[in-house]
Image (spheres, rainbow, N blue to C red):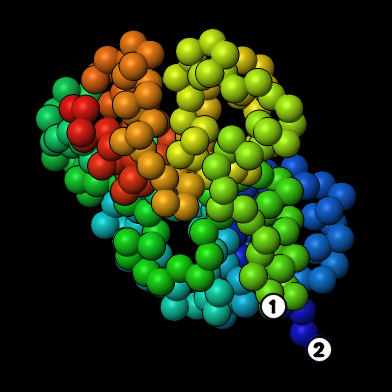
Amino acid sequence: MPKPKLAVWKFASCDGCQLTLLDCEDELLEIAGQIEISAFLEASSAHVDGPYDVSLVEGSITTPHDAERIREVRRVSRTLITIGACATAGGIQSLRNFASVADYAGLVYAHPEYLSTLATSTPVSDHVAVDFELRGCPVSKRQLLELIAATLAGRRPRVPKTAQCTECKARGTVCVTVAQGIPCLGPVTQAGCGNLCPAVGRGCYGCFGPKETPNAPALSARLAALGQTAPQLRDLYRSFNAAAPEFATESLRHD
């Protein structure tokens, strides 16, 4: 029986999520024994034509060519999974969505007329149907392995939708907002990073995007009471997942 064919695709991104897959090392070798890695340019120049059983897509859609290419990837993929903040929410480059790309291009490039770009940076799901989204900037190694194992087994991946605060509680990390008045997006951010920032006394930056049904206005009100200004609140929501609808909407309330 032929092995399932896996393809990994890159769009506008920093390659961090693909590197997370490569960092799996021993686990990746075990996975490779159960699948055929048919297309993964970050790892090998070898390429096997589709169709593919599973496609992992990193990166946002930022050019007309991207939009055309993602439709082709969708066409040749039985299951399409987006990985990382760029693919699931437009990434840090979606800051362009709040400004004029034409104005910035004119300031940066001597001949902006040579550029072929879209006015916005958007998630893959804005262009094609996506079967599952794995959040993070970058994605969690543990969650990525769970995603691949679950997909091969034909079950839904076990990925939490709870707030980052649950990881703080599980680890026994003192809340940086309550104890020190540090701005933190933990209450509205999906868990998954392993409690990286609060564990070293920094507020959560929202790398894993909005949790399920976040109450961003309530968090903003609390942070404003602690002294955060409107521009500071706006910028807090405009980072790795700036274009995620819940974060974008809340940032615009303070613009």
Q: Are marks 1 and 2 in contact (CB under 8 Å)?
A: no
Residue indicated by mark 1? 154
The quarter of the image holding the C terminus is top left
Looking at the picture, tell me which residue is in the foreground, 98 or 163: 163
Q: Secondary structure at mark 1?
A: loop
Residue farthest to the bottom?
A: 1
Q: Residue at x 68, y 52 (%)?
A: 143
Taking the image as shown, residue 162 lies to the left or right of residue 213, namely right
Q: Is residue 59 above or below residue 154?
A: above
Q: Residue at x 37, y 24 (%)?
A: 222
Looking at the picture, tell me which residue is in the foreground, 251 or 12: 251
- Residue 93 appears in view: no
Looking at the picture, tell me which residue is in the foreground, 215 or 44: 215
Q: Is residue 227 above or below residue 69?
A: above
Residue count near mark 2 (Cα–Cα under 10 Å), binned few <14, some 14–19, many ≥20:
few
Looking at the picture, tell me which residue is in the foreground, 140 or 35: 140
Quadrant of residue 128 within the rendered picture: bottom left
Q: Is residue 219 above or below residue 74?
A: above
Residue 83 at x, y = what percent? 54, 53
| Whole-number angstrom distance, CA of label 1 to CA of label 2 | 17 Å
Q: Residue at x 62, y 77 (%)?
A: 53
Residue indicated by mark 2? 1
Residue count near mark 1 (Cα–Cα under 10 Å), binned few <14, some 14–19, many ≥20:
few
Residue 121 at x, y = what percent? 30, 46
Q: Amino acid at mark 2?
A: Met
Q: Secondary structure at mark 2?
A: loop
Q: Amino acid at mark 1?
A: Gly
The quarter of the image holding the N terminus is bottom right
Residue 51 at x, y = what percent? 56, 80
